[in-house]
């Protein structure tokens, strides 16, 4: 059994004007597809073929750089498409909203800290909102295609929201302006999905 590229849950143009159509086409159809293809190549014939992405992330320190980079890339982008949506943005509700209020200093402070995590990640990587093992929230960033599920992560946890800060995520539309891209990100966050992931992480 090999990994396949998940379909986008909306049209390529659905996130305009925040995320442009051409970036979405290349990001999903070329970049994410390449992570899937290269992950399958790296696992082909190995004893780890058939493991789930989550299983691979949890033992990534024992696996090859190709599995780390491409498995991380596949996991991260699969999450990314799901936590975005057209006509979205706004603020979380329910238990997640309460947790952000009580643990992260409120929604505005959380946004500031998340943007800061994305802005201070030098080079390529991701900013994350995670549920840690003790069930509290944490904001952090990881380099390259690493993520908090990996057993080498500085900020281990279950990611429930992620922002791709690789230049390929924004360069066509925003050029070098990562801050503008991150500001636009908040207009397309699917808080219903992030809240669902929060509830699942709290229940697991
Ligand atoms: Mn990307």
Image: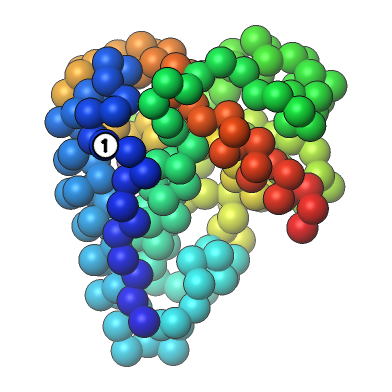
Vertical order, 192 against 188 (above or below) = below
The N terminus is located in which quarter?
A: bottom left
- Residue at 31 percent across and 66 percent down: it is 4
The C terminus is located in which quarter?
A: bottom right
In-front residue for pair 203/108: 203
Q: How many marks?
A: 1
Residue 137 vs residue 178: left or right? Answer: right
Q: How is the image coloured?
A: rainbow
- Residue at 37 percent across and 87 percent down: it is 46
- Residue at 25 percent across and 45 percent down: it is 28
Q: Is residue 60 visible?
A: no
Q: Position of residue 88 (x, y in %)?
A: 47, 22
Q: Which residue is mark 1?
A: 11
In terms of image quadrants, where is residue 75? bottom left
Q: Position of residue 57 (x, y in %)?
A: 53, 63
Q: Is residue 53 visible?
A: yes
Q: Position of residue 60 (x, y in %)?
A: 51, 67
In terms of image quadrants, where is residue 18? top left
Vertical order, 36 against 146 (above or below) = below
SS type, badge 1: loop
In terms of image quadrants, where is residue 40? bottom left
- Residue at 65 percent across and 42 percent down: it is 196
Residue 132 vs residue 18: left or right? Answer: right
Q: Position of residue 142 (x, y in %)?
A: 50, 41
Residue at mark 1: C-beta within 8 A of ligand 1: no
* Mark 1 surroundings within 10 Å by alpha-carbon count, few (fewer than 14), some (14 through 19), many (20 or more): few
């Amino acid at each position: 059994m090999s990994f396949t590229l998940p379909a986008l849950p909306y049209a390529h143009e659905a996130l305009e004007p925040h995320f442009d159509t051409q970036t979405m086409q290349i990001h999903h159809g070329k970049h994410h597809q390449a992570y899937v293809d290269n992950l399958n190549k790296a696992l082909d014939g190995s004893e780890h073929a058939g493991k789930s992405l989550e299983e691979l992330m949890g033992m990534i320190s024992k696996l090859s750089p190709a599995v780390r980079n491409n498995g991380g890339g596949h996991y991260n982008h699969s999450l990314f498409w799901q936590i975005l949506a057209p006509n979205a943005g706004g603020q979380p509700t329910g238990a997640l909203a309460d947790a952000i209020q009580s643990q992260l200093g409120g929604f505005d402070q959380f946004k500031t800290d998340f943007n800061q995590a994305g802005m201070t990640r030098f080079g390529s990587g991701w900013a994350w909102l995670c549920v840690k093992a003790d069930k509290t929230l944490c904001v952090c960033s990881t380099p390259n295609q690493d993520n908090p599920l990996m057993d080498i992560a500085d900020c281990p946890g279950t990611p429930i929201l992620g922002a791709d800060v690789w230049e390929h995520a924004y360069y066509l539309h925003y050029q070098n302006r990562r801050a503008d891209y991150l500001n636009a990100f908040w207009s397309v966050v699917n808080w219903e999905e992030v809240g669902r992931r929060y509830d699942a992480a709290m229940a697991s």
